[in-house]
Image (tube, rainbow, N blue to C red):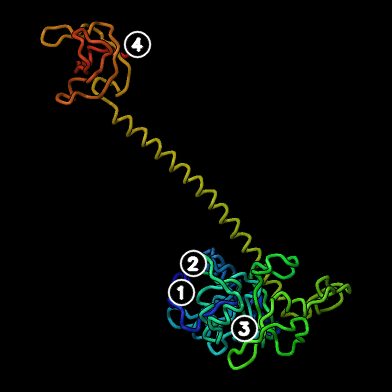
Amino acid sequence: SLGKLGLASGYGAKECVARWGMLLIDVQRWRQERVTERIEGWLVRAQSAGEPSLWRAAGAGPQAPWLLAIGALADGAPRSSSGDAPKAEGAAASASTAGFAPLGEAWGCSGLASEAMSVQEAMALKRQGLDEQVMAQLRIKQDVDGNMHPFVSTCTAKAKLLHFSGPAKPWMVEDGQAARRHALCSAPLNLRLDAWEGTPTFHIDGGNVIFVACQDLWRQYISETSLIGEEDGEDEPSGSSDGRLDSKGDQQWADHHQKFLSNLKKQVEGEQTRDVEAEKELKLKKLLERQRHRERELERRRVIGGFLVGQKVKSNTDISVRGEVIVKKGALGTIQGPSAKHPQERINVFFKGRMDGKFRSVNVLPREIVLEESG
């Protein structure tokens, strides 16, 4: 896919993906850099290169064009195979401005709604000082798939943001439900620990740490009012009171954006039309293949005289072998195939009754038999 877009193959050691659940955007710079136009430009570029599903590539969802737009490759900006920054995205990508900055673990302490952790994650905890004894005291156990329960986080002690990624969201889990599966978090140093008086303290990574249920941390910071939402209405976007855009540049961007949406709609409709045509072509291909199969099967069954293997026939005359009549006229039989010795002259037929009492087929001439229904 990247090759078709004219990009140098491969990512560097600094490649990254965005964590959508915890994302900070400098909106002013986003507009200055026209990131939205650049994202749309990559979608158009992908469409032109025959890669209309760029936003679904490798299960990355919308990240692919988004990361290409902000320059998430190793050198700070996506580069073409010639070494130049692509110019089709609507704004020049500069290698001097990577478009993103890592905020560090304190700004992205995640996994707090997880129900388990991998062996690798458990090993990372051990390197931080959570030895076997601490693991045992926290009642961490391994399941049959090798995952460790419950999930344990140490970044919460100094975190600036708590990211409850995972299935066990505290606002969706009822009190007491699956308590043993709740993630454990190191309590922040500035948090009053009255509610956890008597909880064991562990000496980890040069300091004392108390582990509490992550959902309890959430309850410490969230009030009912915050959950319900403010009652003073939604925030209004900045701009004139009549809803018009403030500047000529904004109007140009809006026009460009509307044009992009119109083009994208045409592309989607075109893809749907191509899908319908492709489906029709596939059905026709299958139909023709079945027809060819029937023709091959018919050819395989065909024997001399226009007869087919499996057809019901009857003798048109008495049939003799070495002067002895073994099949009387009118005897019923079934065509087995061509004669093994004389396939271009005789037909092998199994008759229901032979005059000599033998239980075997007879090689006959085509004129000696007729179809059963014809007589």
First reached walking from the N terminus: tag 3 or tag 1: 1
In space, the residues marked 4 and 3 are separated at their CA atoms by: 90 Å
Q: Quadrant of residue 294?
A: top left
In percent of width and height, residue 265 lies at: 63, 60
Residue at which label 2 appears: 49
Query: Which image quarter holds the C terminus?
Result: top left
Q: Say whether disc 1 or disc 2 marks the residue closer to the N-terminus.
A: 1
Q: Amino acid at mark 2?
A: Ala
- Rendering coords of residue 15 (x, y %): 51, 80
Amino acid type assigned to the residue bearing label 1 in the image = Gly
- The residue beneath circle 1 is 6
- In the rendered structure, are the residues bearing label 2 and label 4 in contact, judged by CB atoms less than 8 Å apart? no
Residue hosting label 4 = 374
Circles 2, 3 touching at the beta carbon (< 8 Å): no
Asked if the residue under mark 1 is in contact with the one under mark 4, i.e. CB atoms within 8 Å, the reply is no
Q: Secondary structure at mark 2?
A: loop
On the image, which quarter does residue 150 sit in? bottom right
Q: CA distance from mark 2 to mark 3?
A: 46 Å
Q: In the depicted view, which residue is nearer to us: 116 or 320? A: 116
Q: Residues within 10 Å of mark 3 (few under 14, many from 20)?
A: many
Q: Can you identify the residue that label 3 sits on?
A: 154
Name the secondary structure under disc 1: loop
Residue at x-position 85% and y-position 74%: 225
The answer for how far apart the CA atoms under marks 3 and 1 are is 43 Å
Q: CA distance from mark 4 to mark 1?
A: 71 Å
Q: Nearer the viewer, mark 3 or mark 1?
A: 3
Marks 2 and 4, how far apart in space? 64 Å
